[in-house]
Image (tube, rainbow, N blue to C red):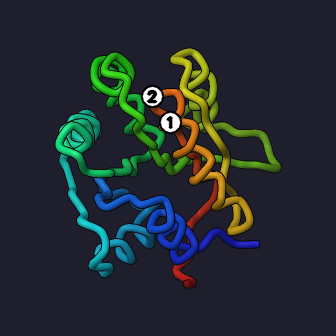
Amino acid sequence: MALTAGKIVAELKRCGFDYVVTVPDDDSRRLYRLIESRPEFKLVSACREGEVIAIAAGLMLGGKSPVVLIQNTGFYESGDSVRGLAIDLKLPMVILISCRGWKSHAPMTDSASIYIRPALDAWGIKHHLVENDEDVGKIAVAHHEATKAQRPTAVLFGCDISDDE
């Protein structure tokens, strides 16, 4: 079963997100294009992932409901912003992470995917793996957990996202 951009976008809307803050990457390009075409979302593109966390934090402090969309390599780059803003300010931020190099049924060789779960665990960031449309409801679970705990949570996209709506 596939993971489709349309199902993800529908779940983001259902959760009440109004902004998507991202650094565009090849893994999430189909999701980016669909979000860009939807008037219910404001898409904010940044140059670096550390900026994405800061922009989302500012939007949250201003009363908006952003979700972050970055690649696993970008999560590592954003570390100081995740720590200093999302964690230290106790922001209920949902971080969607496209996992370059993820292999569910084969040994992983890309260190970006090998270390993403241990990195999130070390920082106490709960995370959920989404690999098909049946898993998309985990975005709402992550949103609920972030809101309840007043800290960031992550959703890992462990496969390519298709164009199908």
Residue found 38% across the figure and 50% down from its top: 67
In the image, 139: left or right of 89?
A: right
What kind of residue is marked 1?
A: Ala
Instruction: Give x and y (percent) for residue 42.
Output: 24, 66
Task: State which quarter of the image contains the C terminus.
Answer: bottom right
Q: Nearer the viewer, residue 74 or 126?
A: 126
Instruction: Give x and y (percent) for residue 72.
Output: 48, 40
Q: Nearer the viewer, residue 44 or 102?
A: 44
Identify whether 126 is placed above or below 25.
above
Residue found 62% across the figure and 22% down from its top: 118
Identify whether 126 is placed above or below 8.
above
Disc marking residue 118: none
Q: Are the residues at dot 1 and dot 2 in contact (C-beta closer than 8 Å)?
A: yes
Q: Nearer the viewer, residue 56 or 65?
A: 65
Identify whether 164 is placed above or below 48.
below
State the SS at label 2.
loop
Place residue 75 in its image quadrant: top left
Task: State which quarter of the image contains the N terminus.
Answer: bottom right
In the image, 25: left or right of 63?
A: right
Instruction: Give x and y (percent) for residue 26.
Output: 41, 61
**Outermost residue, right direction?**
105
In the image, 85: left or right of 121?
A: left
Residue found 36% across the figure and 72% down from its top: 35
Identify whether 114 is placed above or below 139.
above
Label 2: few (<14), some (14–19) or many (≥20) C-alpha neighbours in 10 Å? some
Q: Circle 1 sits on which residue?
A: 146
Q: Circle 2 sits on which residue?
A: 150
